[in-house]
C-alpha cells in the first residue's frame, strides 16, 4: 500500500515543483516579456495588420488585401531607389566603418606617446549630435565655398559636387560616418588589448610577419567583435534617417517651412533611404498601410542580414571558444 | 499546448490586434450643441514661435476674450502638422478645438477624412458670406471637393524683387512685365567672373529657393487636374510652356551645372545672407515676407517689387501671382465647436484682428476688407503683394487627398528637365500624370 501510494505522491510533488519553477522563471522573465510584448510584439503585429489595410491615420482602417504590397513594389516611385541606396550604404558604409574603426584601433594600441590624446581625438566626433555633424560636413564639402574643394582644387585635383552630386552624395555620407567611427574604435581597441600576448610572442619566435600575426592571431581572436560591429552596423544603417535627410535638405537649399512637403533624397533621390519612405508614406501621403509594408521590408532585411552573418561568422564565438 | 488553447490564444491575439488597431482611429463628428454664453475653455493650437509672432497672436486672442468674456482660450504655439495629425487622431480632453497650420498641402486630407469639421453650416448660421469676405484663390486652398473645412488666416503672395542699383547699372528703367522682357533683363543683369558670376540676373534653377515649379507655373494659370480629377500636366499647355521657358532660361544664363555651382555659394534662404540681400542675384521671386527680412537684415538695400512677369501671350493677366497661406479649422472631435467657431470667425473675419496680425507678422491680410483697411501698414514694396493677392487671376495649387505629393512628382520632372535628363518632356509629363493619379487613387 505504502509503495503503491508513494509513486503518485512523488509525481505530484515533482509536478508541483516543476510548475513552481516554471512560474518563478516566468516571474523573473516578466519585465522582459511585458517590455518585449508591448514594444516589439504588439507593434510588429499591428504593422503586419495595417500592411493589409487601407488606413490614412484618421478614418477607420478597411481591408485592401495585397494592394499596399503591390503599390510599394510596383507603383511607388521611391521604393527601388531607396532600396538600392540602403543596400549600397549597408555594403560600402558598414564595411568602410569596420575596416577604418579596426585600423584606428590597431594604430592607437601601438601608439605610446600621447595615446590618451589620440583616443580622445578619435572618439570625440562620435559624441557630436548627428544634425550638427551633418551640417558641418555639408558646409565643409560645399562645392562652391567649402574648404575641402578649395584644398583639392589647389593641388589640381577634380572638385566633386559631394552632397550636390548624385554620384558623390553617398560617398560623402560615408566620409561623415567614418569621421564618427569612435564607437567602433573603442570596442576594437578593448578587444585588441585582450588578445593574449603569449600568442604574439610564440608567433614572433616562429618568425611570423606583421600580416601573418594579424591574419592568424589578431583576427581569429577578435572575430566575435568584428561580427558584432558588422551586425549592429547593418541594423543601424537600415535605420539611417537623420544624416541623409539633413544633408539633402541643407544641400538642396530648400529648407521649407513647417509642414511643407519637401523633396526627399536630394540630389535625384541619391540619399533616399527606406526609413525616409516610412515617414513619406505614413505622415506626408497619409498612407499608413504602405508605410507598414516598407517597415516590414526593413525588418525582414535586417533579420536576413543578421541571420546570414551569424551563420557564416559562427555566431559570437572566438576561434578559441569554437 | 492543447488545440483549444492554441486556437483561443490566436483568436484573442487577433482580437487584441484588431481592437488596438481600430482604436487608433478618431474623428467623430462634433455635436455643436455647446452654449457660448456659458463659461467655457477652448484650446487653440498654432505654429508661430518667434516672440514677435506669438505676442501678436496672443494679443488677438486677448482681444477676442475681452469681447467674449464667457470663452477662455488656452493658446499652444510652435505646433507643426505632425503634432496636429497625432492630436486629431488621438482626440481626448487635451486635443485642440481650434487648429491652424502653415501649409495648405494637407487641407485635402483634413477635409476628406472629417478630422476638421465642415464649417459651412456654422458659417451659414453666423451669416458669414465667404465669397464676399475672402479672395477666390484663398477660398480654393481652404476647401476640398466642395467641402469647406478651413478658412484662410493671413495670406502669402509671391512676386518679383529687384535690385534698383543693379537695374540702373544695366540701364533698365522699369521692372519687366512679360517673360521676354524678363529674360532680356536677366541676361543683361548677369555678370560673369571666371567660371562663375559676380552677379546673376535671376536664379532659374528649381532649387533656387522660391524658384519652384508651382510658383513659376502660376504665371501661366495651370489647372493641374481635369474635370474628372485626373492629373493633366501633359496636356495642359501651361505646364509644358513653363518647363520649356525655365529650361531655356537656364541655358541662357550659363547652363544648369554652372548655375548649380553658383547656387551652392548662397547663404540660408531665411537668414541675412540670402542671395538677394547680398547682391548675388539682382532679381528674385519671393513671398511678401522678404520685405520684413530685408528691413531687418539690409535696411539700406535699394530695391523694388512688382508682380512676377507673365507669358507674352497672356500680357493681360499681368499682376497675377501664386498665393498660399496659413489655414485654420475646428477639430471635428471638439465638444465646444460653437465656441471654437467664435474664435475662428474672429481671427479670420474681424478686420481689426486680421489687420493688426498682418501688420505684426508682415503677411498679407486674407480678407477683402483687410486689404483695403487704412490701418494696414503699407510701404510701396508691400503694396505689390496686396495687389497680387486681390488680383482675380492669381492662383494656387489645388488640395488633394495625399498632401502635396503631386507637386513633388511634377517638381521631379522639373529637376530632370532643367538638368537635360528628359528626352521627351510630354512623355515624362504623361508618366508623371499616371503616377499622380495612382498615388491619389491609392489613398482615396
Image (cartoon, helix red, strand yellow):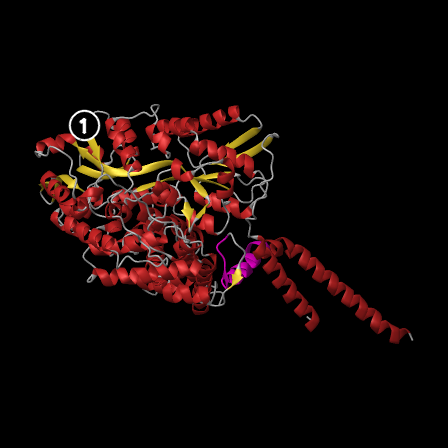
Of A116 and B81, nearer the camera is B81
- What span is colored magenta in the figure? A38-57
Position in image of residue B27 (x %, y %): 54, 48
Tell me: B211 left or right of B23: left
Q: Magenta region, mostly helix, strand or loop? A: helix
Q: Residue at x 66, y 69 (%)?
A: B6
Q: Is residue A120 visible?
A: no
Quadrant, the N terminus of chain B: bottom right
Q: Quadrant of residue B160?
A: top left
Coordinates of residue B167 in the picture (x, y in percent) = 12, 33
Is residue B157 or residue B237 the one in the foreground?
Answer: B237
Residue bearing the label numbered 1: B302
Residue B130, picture quadrant: top left
**Front position in the image: A146 or A59:** A59
Q: Is residue A309 a member of the stretch shown in magenta?
A: no
| Camera-nearest residue between A320 and B95 | B95
Q: Quadrant of the C terminus of chain B?
A: bottom left
In the image, residue B393 sits, relative to residue A29, either above or below, namely: above
Q: Is residue B195 left or right of residue A69?
A: left
Q: Is residue A49 magenta?
A: yes
Q: Badge 1: few (under 14), some or many (20 or more) residues near its Cα, within 10 Å?
A: few
Residue at 20 percent of width and 47 percent of height: B260
Q: Would you identify the image quadrant in which residue B135 lies?
A: top left
Q: Is residue B414 visible from the viewing direction of this image?
A: yes
SS for callout 1: loop
Q: Chain of mark 1?
A: B
Amino acid at each position: 500500500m505504502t509503495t503503491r501510494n508513494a509513486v503518485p505522491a512523488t509525481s505530484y510533488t515533482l509536478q508541483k515543483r516543476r510548475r513552481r519553477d516554471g512560474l518563478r522563471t516566468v516571474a523573473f522573465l516578466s519585465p522582459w516579456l511585458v517590455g518585449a510584448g508591448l514594444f516589439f510584439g504588439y507593434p510588429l503585429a499591428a504593422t503586419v495588420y495595417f500592411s493589409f489595410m487601407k488606413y490614412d491615420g484618421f478614418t477607420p482602417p478597411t481591408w485592401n488585401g495585397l494592394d499596399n504590397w503591390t503599390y510599394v513594389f510596383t507603383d511607388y516611385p521611391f521604393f527601388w531607389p531607396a532600396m538600392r541606396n540602403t543596400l549600397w550604404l549597408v555594403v560600402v558604409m558598414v564595411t568602410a566603418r569596420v575596416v577604418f574603426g579596426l585600423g584606428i584601433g590597431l594604430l592607437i594600441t601601438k601608439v605610446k606617446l600621447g595615446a590618451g590624446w589620440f583616443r580622445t581625438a578619435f572618439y570625440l566626433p562620435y559624441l557630436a549630435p548627428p544634425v550638427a555633424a551633418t551640417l558641418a560636413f555639408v558646409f565643409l564639402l560645399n562645392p562652391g565655398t567649402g574648404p575641402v574643394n578649395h584644398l583639392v582644387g589647389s593641388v589640381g585635383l577634380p572638385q566633386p559636387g559631394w552632397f550636390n552630386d548624385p554620384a558623390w552624395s553617398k560617398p560623402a555620407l560615408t566620409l561623415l560616418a567614418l569621421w564618427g567611427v569612435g564607437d567602433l574604435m573603442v570596442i576594437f581597441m578593448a578587444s585588441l588589448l585582450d588578445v593574449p600576448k603569449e600568442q604574439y610572442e610564440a608567433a614572433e619566435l616562429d618568425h611570423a610577419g606583421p600580416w601573418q600575426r594579424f591574419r592568424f592571431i589578431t583576427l581569429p581572436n577578435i572575430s566575435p567583435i568584428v561580427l558584432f560591429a558588422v551586425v549592429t552596423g547593418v541594423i543601424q544603417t537600415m535605420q539611417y534617417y537623420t544624416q541623409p535627410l539633413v544633408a539633402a535638405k541643407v544641400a538642396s537649399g530648400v529648407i521649407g517651412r513647417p509642414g511643407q512637403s519637401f523633396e526627399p533624397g536630394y540630389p535625384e533621390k541619391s540619399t533616399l533611404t527606406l526609413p525616409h519612405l516610412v515617414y513619406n508614406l505614413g505622415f506626408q501621403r497619409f498612407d499608413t498601410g504602405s508605410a507598414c509594408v516598407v517597415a516590414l521590408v526593413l525588418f525582414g532585411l535586417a533579420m536576413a542580414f543578421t541571420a546570414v552573418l551569424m551563420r557564416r561568422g559562427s555566431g559570437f564565438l572566438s576561434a578559441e571558444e569554437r | 499546448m492543447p488545440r483549444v488553447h492554441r486556437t483561443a490564444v490566436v483568436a484573442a491575439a487577433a482580437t487584441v490586434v484588431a481592437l488596438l488597431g481600430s482604436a487608433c482611429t478618431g474623428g467623430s463628428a462634433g455635436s455643436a450643441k455647446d452654449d457660448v454664453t456659458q463659461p467655457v475653455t477652448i484650446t487653440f493650437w498654432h505654429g508661430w514661435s518667434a516672440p514677435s509672432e506669438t505676442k501678436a497672436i496672443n494679443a488677438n486672442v486677448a482681444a477676442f476674450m475681452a469681447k467674449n468674456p464667457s470663452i477662455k482660450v488656452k493658446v499652444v504655439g510652435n505646433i507643426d502638422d505632425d503634432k496636429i495629425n497625432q492630436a486629431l487622431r488621438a482626440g481626448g480632453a487635451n486635443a485642440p478645438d481650434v487648429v491652424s497650420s502653415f501649409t495648405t498641402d494637407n487641407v485635402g486630407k483634413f477635409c476628406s477624412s472629417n478630422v476638421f469639421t465642415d464649417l459651412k453650416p456654422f458659417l451659414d448660421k453666423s451669416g458669414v458670406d465667404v465669397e464676399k469676405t475672402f479672395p477666390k484663390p484663398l477660398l480654393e486652398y481652404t476647401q476640398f471637393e466642395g467641402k469647406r473645412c478651413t478658412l484662410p488666416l493671413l495670406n502669402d503672395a509671391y512676386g518679383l524683387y529687384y535690385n534698383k542699383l543693379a537695374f540702373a547699372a544695366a540701364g533698365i528703367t522699369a521692372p519687366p512685365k512679360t517673360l521676354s522682357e524678363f529674360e532680356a533683363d536677366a541676361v543683361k543683369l548677369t555678370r560673369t567672373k571666371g567660371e562663375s558670376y559676380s552677379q546673376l540676373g535671376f536664379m532659374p534653377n528649381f532649387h533656387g529657393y522660391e524658384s519652384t515649379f508651382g510658383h513659376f507655373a502660376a504665371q501661366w494659370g495651370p489647372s493641374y487636374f481635369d474635370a474628372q480629377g485626373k492629373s493633366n500636366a501633359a496636356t495642359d499647355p501651361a505646364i509644358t510652356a513653363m518647363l520649356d521657358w525655365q529650361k531655356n532660361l537656364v541655358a541662357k544664363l550659363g547652363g544648369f551645372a554652372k548655375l548649380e555651382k553658383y547656387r551652392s555659394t548662397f547663404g540660408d534662404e531665411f537668414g541675412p545672407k540670402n542671395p538677394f540681400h547680398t547682391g548675388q542675384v539682382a532679381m528674385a521671386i519671393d513671398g511678401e515676407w522678404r520685405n520684413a527680412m530685408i528691413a531687418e537684415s539690409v535696411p539700406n538695400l535699394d530695391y523694388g517689387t512688382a508682380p512676377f512677369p507673365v507669358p507674352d501671350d497672356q500680357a493681360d493677366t499681368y499682376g497675377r501671382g501664386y498665393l498660399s497661406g496659413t489655414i485654420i479649422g475646428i477639430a471635428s472631435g471638439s465638444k465646444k465647436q460653437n465656441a471654437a467657431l467664435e474664435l475662428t470667425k474672429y481671427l479670420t473675419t474681424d478686420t481689426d484682428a486680421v489687420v493688426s496680425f498682418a501688420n505684426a507678422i508682415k503677411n498679407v491680410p486674407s480678407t477683402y476688407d483687410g486689404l483695403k483697411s487704412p490701418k494696414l501698414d503699407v510701404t510701396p514694396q508691400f503694396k505689390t503683394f496686396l495687389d497680387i493677392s486681390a488680383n482675380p487671376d492669381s492662383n494656387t495649387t489645388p488640395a488633394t487627398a495625399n498632401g502635396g505629393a503631386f507637386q513633388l512628382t511634377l517638381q521631379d520632372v522639373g529637376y530632370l528637365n532643367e538638368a537635360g535628363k528628359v528626352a521627351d518632356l510630354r512623355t515624362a509629363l504623361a508618366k508623371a500624370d499616371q503616377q499622380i493619379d495612382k498615388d491619389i487613387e491609392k489613398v482615396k
